Image: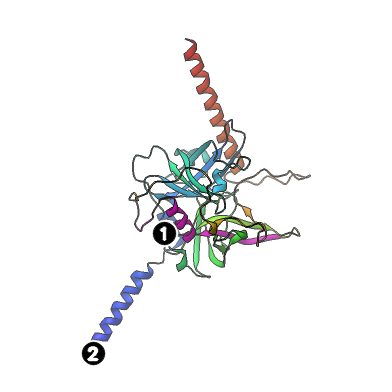
Amino acid sequence: MRSMMWGTLFALSLIWSTIAIGKELSPREIYERDSPAVVMVMGYADGGGKGSGGTGSIIQADGLVLTNAHVVIEEQTGKPFARLSVFLKPTRVTGDSKSDLSRMVRAKVVAYSQPLDLALLKLEGVTEPLPVVDVSESGRARIGDRVVAIGHPEQGGLWTLTTGVISAEVDNFNGVKGKQVFQTETGLNRGNSGGPLLDGEGRMIGVNTAIARVAPDGLPITSISFSLKSSVATQWLREQGVGLRAGRGAPLPAGQMQPATDQPLAPSVQPQAKPVQPPQSDLSPKPTMKPDVAPPVPVRPYNLDQLISDRAKAEADLENMMLEMRGRMKGR
C-alpha cells in the first residue's frame, strides 16, 4: 500500500513539473504561434525627410505594441516621429513588400524611456482583438537556453525567424543602472530593433535592442547581440499603468498611461556619466558613408532604408495632396 502511495505521489509530481515547466515548442511552432503578433514599425518626420524602422510586439489585444524607443524617437529632436505606421503580418510572407506591407495601421507613442530604450505604442482604429505575444518572467531563463527571434533584419526577409541560445547576462548595460540584458548569438541585425526574444515555450523573455559588430581596432564582431530582459520591460510597463497576465487574445486591463514624454522613471534607471560597456550599435537604420569603391549590390528581399524612404515620401505626397484639396475647397 505504501509503495503504491509513493508511486502515485511520484507520478503526480512528474505531471505537475511538466505542467509547471510547460511544453517545449519547435521553432516552427513558435513562429506559427507568435509571428502574427509581431509587427513592423516605421516612423518618419513631417515632409518625409528622415525616418527609422524596426520591429514591435503586440502585448495587448486592443492594440498596445512594445518596441524600442530608438525606433520611434527622432534622434535630432529627442521626440516621437510625427508619423508612425505599423504593419500587421499578412497571411503569407512572399518577399514582395507591396503585398507583405499591405496591412498598415496608424499608431501613436503613449510612453517611452530612452535610458531603457523602450516605447509603448497604441494602434488606432482597432475594431477586433489582435493576437498577442505572451510575456514570460526572464528570471526563468538561463545561459544555454534555446531562444528565437522574429523581426525584419536588413537585407533579409520580413518576419524573419532566427534561432540561438542565451550566451550571457549583463547587468547595468552600457552604464544604465537597472538595465539588465541577455547576450545572445541569435542572428539580429538592423530592423530587428524592438522585436521579441522568445523562449522555448514561445513566450517573450527579452526585447531585442543592440548589436556589437565592429571592435575598436576595426575587426568584425559576430554573434554578439543584446536583448533587454522582460522583467525590466514589465516593471516599466507597470509604471505606465499597463499590467500583463497569462493568456492569449483577450484585452488586458490598463490604468492611466503617462503621456508620451521621456520622463525620469526612477533613480534606478537613469544613465550614468560613463558607460562601463563598449559602445554598442542599436538596430535602427542610419545613414552610412559611401565607400570609395561601391561594393556590388546584393540581391535581397527588401532594403530597409529604401522602404522607409518610400513610405515617408508617400506620406509627404499624401499630405500635400490633402492640403491642395483643402485649398481648392476653400477657394470655391
Question: Residue type at mark 2?
Answer: Arg
Residue 183: x, y in percent?
A: 57, 63
Residue 2, which numbered label? 2
In three-dimensional space, the C-alpha distance between marks 1 and 2, rounded to whole angstroms, equals: 42 Å
Farthest residue, direction right: 292
Q: Residue at x 48, y 56 (%)?
A: 233
Q: Is residue 58 above or below residue 83?
A: below
Residue 122 at x, y = what percent? 43, 43
Q: Quadrant of residue 30?
A: bottom left
Residue at the far top in the pictured view: 332
**Tag 2, which secondary structure?**
helix
N-terminal-most mark, 1 or 2: 2
Q: Which residue is outermost to the bottom?
A: 2
**Under tag 1, what secondary structure?**
helix
Residue 151 locus on image (x, y percent): 52, 51
240 in magenta: yes
Neighbourhood count class around disc 2 (C-alpha, 10 Å): few under 14, some 14–19, many 20 upward = few
Mark 1 packing: few (<14 Cα in 10 Å), some, or many (20+)?
few
Left or right: residue 137 versus residue 224 is: left
